[in-house]
Amino acid sequence: MGEDLDALRAAWSAQTVELPRFSPEELRGAARRFDRVIWRRNLIELAAGALVVGTFGWMGWEAEGWGRLGALLTVAGAVFAVGTLLVRGTPRGEVAGDCLRWRREELIRQRDLLASVWRWYLMPLVPGQVVLLVAIGAEVVAVPGGTWVVAWAACVVLVVFGGVGWMNRRAAAALQRELDELEGADA
């Protein structure tokens, strides 16, 4: 048994692993594809932000009191989130010089942006959503079943926020795997 184990260790130690190497053309192609994905993501988020601003802006115009405040805080949060995404998440242009270093830096930048989505994307929306839930609660608490309306609205907000956080965490993990692959190829 000991000899078999020694032979297995020797075979394992003797093997060589050929890691993939990326040519500058492959890196540039990957960078262009990555940029297209990022531009598409930003465009979708910009459209979603416009929808939030339009919807909650209209609600703020029509509502009174706490409802108006909640809607306008949501608009402000959406403007902040989309602005942050456009400033921090826009691709930085054409690859110049060291393709591998540029690719690594871009992956790290996007990974870190997605990993911190709770701070810059979701938290700015929380004050408006809380104030809106309070406003809804004040209106419907006297109505039979009104408490359930508020509870369901709060659950919807939590599920949406949780889903956005989860999707971004998965996307950040995928970028980390891509970064790990790139690091392995550079070894």
Image (cartoon, rainbow, N blue to C red):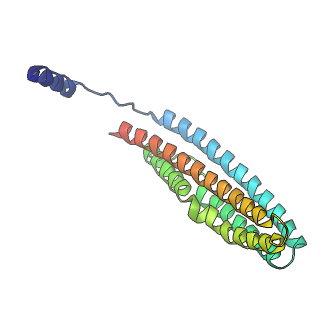
Say whether residue 157 is visible: yes
Give the quarter of the figure containing the N terminus.
top left
Left or right: where does residue 24 sit relative to residue 56?
left
Left or right: where does residue 47 sit relative to residue 107?
right
* Farthest residue, direction left: 3
* Farthest residue, direction front: 144
What residue is at 45 percent from the left and 33 percent from the top? 23
What residue is at 42 percent from the left and 38 percent from the top? 181
Quadrant hosting residue 149: bottom right
Quadrant hosting residue 70: bottom right
**Viewer-nearest residue: 162 or 27:** 162
Q: Position of residue 55 (x, y in %)?
A: 83, 61
**Viewer-nearest residue: 101 or 54:** 54
Q: Is residue 26 above or below residue 121?
A: above
Give the quarter of the figure containing the C terminus.
top left
Q: Is residue 20 above or below residue 7?
A: below
Q: Position of residue 121 (x, y in %)?
A: 63, 62
Q: Position of residue 101 (x, y in %)?
A: 43, 48
